[in-house]
Image: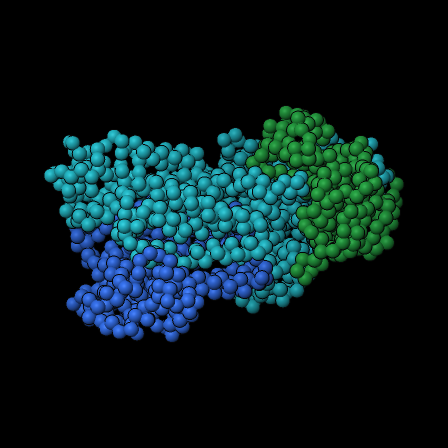
């Protein structure tokens, strides 16, 4: 089911139950009328049968549904207002207000709700326990979890630049909260509201079942209470006991569906995706005759994103990477350079699919490998360094474990001390003190993390390393250090590199040959010198002109 | 403020709030509980000496004869001595004895069932998220529906079907009443037999929440770069799934475990009512039905402290599985 | 015409000193580039001048066209800011129209000026009804520039205005800023880590390192003949293809 289908079917079911609660009591008779037809099974005059005292179950059900929905609505609104107040306002204000508000929410959260309600109900005489008392108590014990969620969301939103921009343009605080932040919180607030409503209906049912419900109202919970005390199940009068629970379950289920829908709106990653049978389709097992010193050969590669409107991300790309060479892949966002790099290692995710072409690493036809062969191939022959070093390392394990993982999997014969030695050795190669092996990623600086990633890529002495924007997120000086490190290692160890970046000047300095990509196509492929001195494609010239030089004539660009 | 200081402030405030709530509620709400209690005590042939009255007044309020502050201090003093008063419904037993007798039943049944449900939900959720779109994944909405069903309704239907109908499980109780409670194999076996159906109902109704949460986190984590890196490293699927994806995806569930404990305790009260289980929840209800205010308050306090303690435990555990919390000097 | 003078700006966060005694003047018709690596404190300076964060010490003084100091509450009529990431600085929930009409109204102008404002940043008026996700990165940053112009501001702080954009649209946005600056006699603070654009688009350069200004002067002097060791490192770090292919210097 797509998220819209979930949302719509959930809303329809919920609306049907709400309508039943609203209109049902008008159409059915008096639920309290006692007749001498106790425990009549469903059918005839009483569609859902009668209770022990001959009351019509359908009429009771309609009134009880209305009562339960009313409590749910009351509590939902109250709890949402409370959670918004403590969650959103506190988080936006920050400082002491946030500390106090969040402490308060956390304390309310750990104080167990039902026991508290029971204690309160125990002190309040039954005749004074009205719907409002119950609603207030349920709202007070039920808002805190939502406040925590809203606080976390608000904290992340208030640091967004558009909030800062609104403040700079002179917006008042309440307007920033209501107009800039709140609309972006709506899906979360809606889902918390829905959750609060369901929780309230369930809690009220629970309370009523324990005999501690509101004295003045009839709800699905009180109906169940009477059914239970009338031994409905023991008398096999299922028509009396089952419907109230079923209505709650259906309503809860409907709102759960609504929440599924909202979840997928908030977090697009959760949306349904067709499962992909294969990542490679329709490939002829034909490896083009490789050039003598070629190590990686890509021929006529096509990658398509199989979405509603298919996107041809890589179009008929052919590249050759020679032994020990640095091949630069330049292009702007969305040009397909990253898709290409992932497809070479078959790391592209669904719905991306290789539709034709071939990838050969020396004698290995990469696109023809089976899953297990592919796994054994990866990192041994071809390793990768990704853009965000912060995100490429597992945040919850020390870097030792992440380096050793590779050796454990690909070099099972290596002893523990052998692994430790090798890890220390590669760290030393990239200029990181092996004493840092026990460190967690967050304890290292951005540059250090990227060095660790490069060390990891070196572990198995691969022939090819694909580097996807390895220096983009780094400070200028750190970027320079890492680049020098890559050059030195390449000279010492002789691996070949595919270096992907949008920074053409960087490639001109580093790469032996450069391929310029646009809209999935390689528009120019030449040696760095050729590309710099005699660019042929207009796009290459445009890119070259986009980088002002530090040494050329000043102000030339302004004219 | 440092992370640990903040947590300490939290626990102290929560403890103080629980203790104070316990003190304030009977004084704020209508009715005169002390008189009701004394009347009950008299019915049961208890002594109506002034000392007993003073003890209850310290607990529930004197009706303005002493100042609020004096009452509060006396109340705190009694708590510190572990003196929770005398139970009326179980006269002449002390409240603390009644609690000590019933607490283990609840802790074992609810604790084990919750842990089981958590492990099952998280485990299935991890697999469902990892294998998106398979039959296991389509199980997720179904289990979520189970969480929307009123717990006691489901439990009662199961009792009717499995115990009354098929006779597979006993109808109610915590053990066979003909046995003497003790560490005999026969008694433990009987307790296990009686606990199975209640535990099963708890798991059934709570597993969906864990499963859904874990499955969604898993799906989110799977598009993180470190999972991609792990795949690029040629690690085996199971290793990527467990060490990289699930290891990170489980963190919010563990944090959520602490938060859910309050709800778990609430659920246990209903469970014990349905199965007439001899735990602390049914004692609380008995206390309410018999206006046994001292017992009510004592149980509420113990439940809160237990939940706080469990939270502390989860906090420590969380620190162990996520290094980032350990060295965080400021919380963003 | 507004002149902004920052004197002795200092900002401490807990124990670290993010900005330490920074002073400079933004004069009408001139662009000052604030250059430095990440964590040098340059964005903190921007946020202090935009009054998003309060300086620990130091002052920011504005002098209006009439030579009189601008009162504090009128600060935002005069000083506006352009943020680094146009994907984050526009609210995904609102239309372009909202982003421009609000600052216009807040500063006593009419929302009917929106089309004119869009025209000034070389966008067509029909964009007003769209939402940020329907625009390209370059278009978004132009909207952000228009938003900064909306209150009639004369001092513009541009915090890395092009570093998140695709390379082929960067120059276009910078040229737009330069044109607006000339036409409207704006005082611009251009914050960047890119020495080359700083040199081409500014009159004066301040180099920041660890919260302090380590070197300052006319942009050509500072960037072609740096004296401070840190500035030299920065200048040397930029990729320089010419050194590789045109040794000898002759084009």
Q: Nearer the viewer, residue C228 or A306?
A: C228
**Quadrant of image for the N terminus of chain B:** bottom right
Residue name at image x 59 percent, y 38 percent: C91
Q: Nearer the viewer, residue A212 or A354?
A: A212
Going by the picture, which residue comes out furthest to the left? A36
Find residue A426 and report its horizontal and vertical position in percent.
Answer: 64, 61
**Chosen colour scheme:** by chain
Q: Nearer the viewer, residue A275 or A525?
A: A275
Q: Can the viewer see residue B236?
A: no
**Vertical comparison of A425 with B124: above or below:** below
Among the 4 quarters of the image, the one containing residue A107: bottom left
Residue name at image x 35 percent, y 66 percent: B62
Among the 4 quarters of the image, the one containing residue A30: top left
Residue name at image x 80 percent, y 47 percent: C5
Find residue A339 and report its horizontal and vertical position in percent.
Answer: 59, 40
**Vertical comparison of A232 with A122: above or below:** above
**Chain drawn cyan in the picture:** A
Find residue C205 and report its horizontal and vertical position in percent.
Answer: 82, 47
Count of numbered marks:
0
**Chain drawn green in the picture:** C
**Quadrant of image for the C terminus of chain B:** bottom right
Q: Can the viewer see residue C75?
A: yes
Task: Give the left or right position of residue B268, taking residue A366 as reference.
Answer: left
Residue name at image x 23 percent, y 68 percent: B41
Q: Nearer the viewer, residue C72 or A418?
A: C72
- In the figure, the shade used to draw chain B is blue
Find residue A66 and report its horizontal and vertical position in percent.
Answer: 31, 38
**Vertical comparison of B294 with C250: above or below:** below
**Vertical comparison of B17 with A206: above or below:** below
């Amino acid at each position: 089911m797509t998220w819209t289908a979930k949302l719509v079917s959930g809303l329809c079911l919920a609306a049907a139950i709400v309508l039943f609660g609203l209109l049902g009591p008008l159409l059915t008779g008096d639920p309290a009328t006692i007749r001498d037809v106790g425990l009549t099974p469903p059918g005839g005059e009483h569609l859902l049968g009668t209770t022990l005292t001959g009351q019509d179950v359908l009429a009771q059900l309609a009134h009880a549904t209305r009562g339960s929905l009313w409590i749910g609505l009351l509590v939902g609104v109250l709890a949402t207002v409370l959670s918004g107040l403590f969650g959103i306002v506190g988080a936006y204000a920050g400082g002491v207000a946030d500390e106090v508000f969040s402490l308060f929410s956390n304390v309310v959260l750990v104080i167990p709700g039902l026991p508290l309600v029971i204690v309160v109900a125990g002190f309040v005489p039954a005749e004074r326990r009205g719907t409002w008392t119950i609603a207030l108590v349920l709202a007070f014990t039920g808002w805190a979890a939502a406040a925590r969620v809203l606080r976390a969301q608000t904290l992340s939103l208030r640091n967004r630049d558009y909030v800062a921009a609104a403040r700079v343009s002179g917006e008042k605080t309440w307007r920033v909260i209501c107009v800039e932040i709140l609309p972006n919180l709506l899906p979360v607030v809606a889902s918390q509201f829905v959750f609060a409503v369901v929780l309230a209906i369930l809690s009220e049912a629970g309370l009523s079942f324990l005999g501690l419900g509101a004295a003045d109202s009839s709800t699905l919970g009180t109906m169940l209470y009477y059914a239970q005390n009338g031994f409905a199940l023991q008398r096999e009068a299922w028509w009396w006991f089952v419907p109230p629970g079923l209505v709650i379950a259906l309503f809860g289920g409907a709102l759960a569906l609504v929440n599924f829908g909202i979840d997928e709106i908030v977090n697009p990653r959760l949306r349904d995706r067709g499962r992909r049978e294969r990542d490679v389709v329709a490939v002829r097992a034909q490896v083009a005759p490789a050039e003598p010193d070629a190590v990686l050969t890509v021929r006529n590669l096509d990658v398509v994103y199989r979405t509603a409107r298919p996107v041809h991300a890589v179009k008929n790309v052919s590249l050759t990477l020679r032994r020990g060479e640095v091949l630069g892949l330049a292009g702007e966002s969305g040009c397909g350079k990253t898709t290409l790099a992932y497809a070479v290692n078959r790391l592209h995710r669904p719905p991306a699919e290789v539709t034709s072409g071939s990838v050969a690493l020396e004698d290995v036809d990469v696109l023809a490998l089976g899953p297990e062969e592919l796994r054994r191939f990866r990192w041994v022959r071809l390793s990768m360094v990704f853009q965000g070093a912060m995100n490429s390392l597992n945040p919850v394990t020390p870097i030792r474990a992440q380096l050793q993982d590779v050796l454990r999997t690909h070099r099972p014969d290596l002893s523990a001390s052998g692994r430790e030695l090798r890890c220390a050795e590669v760290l030393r190669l990239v200029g990181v003190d092996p004493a840092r092996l026990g460190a967690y990623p967050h304890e290292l600086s951005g540059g250090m993390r990227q060095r660790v990633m490069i060390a990891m890529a070196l572990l198995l002495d691969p022939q090819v390393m694909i580097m996807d924007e390895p220096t983009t997120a780094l400070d200028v000086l750190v970027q320079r250090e890492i680049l020098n490190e890559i050059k030195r290692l390449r000279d010492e160890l002789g691996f070949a590199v595919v270096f992907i970046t949008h920074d053409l000047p960087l490639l001109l300095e580093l790469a032996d040959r450069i391929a310029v990509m646009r809209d999935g196509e390689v528009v120019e492929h030449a040696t760095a010198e050729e590309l710099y001195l005699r660019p042929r494609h207009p796009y290459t010239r445009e890119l070259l002109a986009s980088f002002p030089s530090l040494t050329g004539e000043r102000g030339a660009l302004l004219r | 403020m440092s992370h640990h200081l903040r947590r300490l402030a939290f626990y102290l405030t929560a403890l103080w709030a629980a203790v104070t709530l316990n003190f304030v509620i009977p004084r704020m709400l209508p009715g005169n509980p002390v008189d009701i209690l004394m009347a009950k005590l008299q019915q049961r042939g208890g002594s109506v000496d002034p000392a007993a009255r003073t003890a209850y007044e310290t607990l529930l309020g004197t009706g303005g004869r002493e100042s609020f502050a004096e009452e509060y201090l006396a109340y705190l003093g009694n708590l510190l001595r572990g003196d929770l008063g005398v139970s009326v419904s179980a006269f002449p037993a002390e409240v603390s004895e009644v609690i000590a007798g019933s607490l283990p039943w609840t802790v074992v049944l609810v604790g084990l069932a919750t842990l089981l449900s958590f492990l099952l939900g998280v485990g299935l959720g991890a697999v469902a998220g990892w294998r998106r779109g398979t039959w296991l994944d389509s199980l997720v909405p179904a289990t979520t529906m189970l969480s929307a069903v009123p717990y006691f309704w489901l439990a009662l239907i199961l009792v009717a079907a499995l115990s009354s109908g098929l006779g597979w499980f006993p109808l109610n109780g915590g053990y066979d009443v003909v046995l003497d409670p003790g560490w005999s194999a026969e008694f433990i076996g009987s307790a296990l037999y009686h606990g199975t159906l209640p535990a099963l109902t708890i798991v059934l109704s709570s597993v969906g929440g864990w499963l859904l949460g874990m499955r969604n986190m898993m799906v989110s984590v799977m598009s993180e770069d470190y999972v991609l890196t792990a795949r690029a490293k040629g690690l085996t699927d199971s290793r990527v799934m467990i060490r990289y994806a699930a290891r990170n995806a489980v963190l919010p569930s563990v944090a959520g475990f602490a938060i859910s404990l309050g709800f778990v305790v609430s659920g246990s009260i209903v469970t014990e009512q349905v199965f007439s289980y001899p735990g602390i929840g049914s004692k609380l209800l008995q206390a309410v039905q018999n206006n046994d205010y001292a017992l009510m308050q004592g149980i509420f306090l113990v439940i809160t402290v237990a939940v706080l303690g469990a939270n502390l435990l989860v906090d420590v555990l969380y620190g162990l599985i996520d290094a980032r919390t350990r060295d965080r000097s400021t919380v963003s | 015409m507004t002149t902004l003078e920052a004197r002795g700006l200092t900002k401490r966060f807990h124990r670290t000193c993010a900005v330490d005694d920074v002073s400079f003047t933004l004069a009408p018709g001139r662009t000052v580039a604030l250059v430095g690596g990440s964590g040098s404190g340059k964005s903190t300076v921007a946020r202090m001048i935009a009054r998003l964060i309060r300086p620990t010490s130091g002052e920011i003084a504005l002098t209006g066209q009439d030579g009189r100091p601008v009162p504090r509450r009128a600060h935002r009529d005069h000083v506006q800011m352009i943020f680094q990431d146009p994907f984050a600085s526009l609210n995904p929930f609102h239309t372009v129209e909202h982003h421009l009409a609000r600052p216009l109204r807040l500063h006593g102008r009419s929302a009917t000026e929106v089309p004119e404002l869009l025209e000034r940043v070389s966008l067509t008026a029909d964009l007003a009804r769209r939402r940020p996700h329907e625009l390209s990165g370059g278009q978004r940053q132009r909207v952000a520039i228009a938003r900064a112009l909306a209150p009639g501001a004369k001092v513009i702080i541009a915090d890395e205005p092009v570093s998140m954009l695709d390379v082929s649209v960067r120059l276009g946005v910078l040229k737009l800023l330069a044109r607006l600056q000339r036409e409207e006699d704006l005082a611009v603070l251009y914050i960047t880590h890119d020495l080359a654009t700083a040199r081409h688009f500014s009159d004066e350069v301040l180099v920041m390192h660890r919260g302090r200004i380590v070197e300052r002067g006319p942009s050509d002097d500072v960037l072609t003949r740096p004296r401070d060791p840190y500035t030299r490192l920065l200048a040397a770090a930029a990729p320089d293809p010419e050194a590789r292919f045109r040794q000898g210097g002759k084009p």
